[in-house]
Amino acid sequence: MDPVQKILTIKEVADQLRCSKTHVQHAVSGRLPGVPRLAHVSMGRRKLVRSDWLQDWLEASKLQ
């Protein structure tokens, strides 16, 4: 595992997933029925997602 993990903003996650920022915000807040919540860190109003958390979430979402 790489000791320095890439930290992504909501916009960067949306760009990687090719979806809207709103859709990613719904995933972060758990408002997507049947989809697990996307792990994140809150820094004030800003939400940040580690790249490995995004990959884990994609794998978990694939299984459902």
Image (cartoon, rainbow, N blue to C red):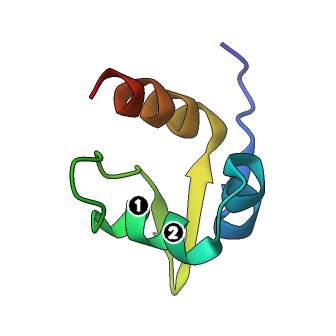
Q: Which residue is rendered at x = 68% and y = 60% of the image?
A: 14
Which quadrant of the figure has residue 4? top right
Residue 43 in the image: x percent, y percent? Answer: 53, 75
Q: Which residue is rendered at x = 65% and y = 38% of the image?
A: 51
Position of 52 relative to 45 (above/below): above
Residue 30 in the image: x percent, y percent? Answer: 28, 63
Q: Is 58 in front, or is 8? A: 58
Residue 63 in the image: x percent, y percent? Answer: 32, 21
Apparent side of residue 64 relative to residue 58 in the rendered image (left or right) = left
Q: Residues within 10 Å of mark 2 (few under 14, many from 20)?
A: some
* Mark 2–mark 1 CB contact (< 8 Å): yes
- Quadrant of image for the C terminus: top left
Residue 23: which disc?
A: 2
Q: Name the secondary structure under disc 1.
A: helix
Count the numbered circles shown: 2
Residue 27 in the image: x percent, y percent? Answer: 40, 60
